Image (tube, rainbow, N blue to C red):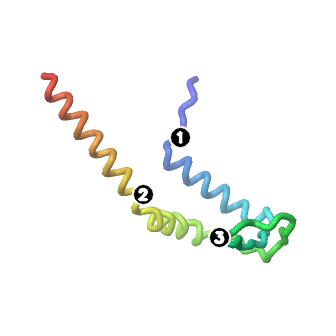
Amino acid sequence: MKFKLPHSYALIVLIILLVTLMTYFVPAGEYKRVSTPKGIERVKPDSFHLINSSPVSFFEFFKSIYEGMVSSADIIFFVFIIGGVFNIIKILVLLTKE
């Protein structure tokens, strides 16, 4: 029996679901940040401390997919446009070979 990889959308949803479940088990924490004279923010070593955990709810799981697509819409449409351009070029190359 040959292994068949699940659809890419199914894999993405499974990864998001796994990360959502991890918000219930992995403790939340953060590092303090300091600014350099040039205005660059750096993480201060040895400044890690735990903060109050805020696990992702069932509805926030679905909301995060929408918000992620909205915040990266410019990249998504750029990839669509480039894919369309490649297909047009491929069609033009095939037509000129005939």
Q: Secondary structure at mark 2?
A: helix
Residue 55 pos. (x, y %): 71, 71
Q: Earlier in the sequence, mark 3 or mark 1?
A: 1
Q: Nearer the viewer, residue 83 or 63?
A: 83
Single out the residue that lies furthest toward the bottom. Answer: 52
Q: CA distance from mark 1 to mark 2?
A: 24 Å
Circle 2: is it few (<14), some (14-19), or many (20+) Cα within 10 Å? few
Q: Nearer the viewer, mark 3 or mark 1?
A: 3
Q: Earlier in the sequence, mark 2 or mark 3?
A: 3
7 up-or-down from 41: above or below: above
Q: Nearer the viewer, mark 1 or mark 2?
A: 2
Q: Find disc 1 in the rendering and name its residue.
A: 6
Say which mark, if any, is on residue 57.
none
Residue 58 pos. (x, y %): 62, 69
Left or right: 47 as drawn, with respect to 23: right
Q: Going 47% across and 67% down the picture, which residue do you hit?
A: 71
Q: Going 53% across and 40% down the picture, which residue do you hit?
A: 6
37 up-or-down from 95: above or below: below
Q: Find disc 2 in the rendering and name its residue.
A: 75
Residue 85 pos. (x, y %): 27, 44
Tell me the quadrant of the picture where the C terminus can be found.
top left
Mark 3 residue type? Lys
16 up-or-down from 37: above or below: above
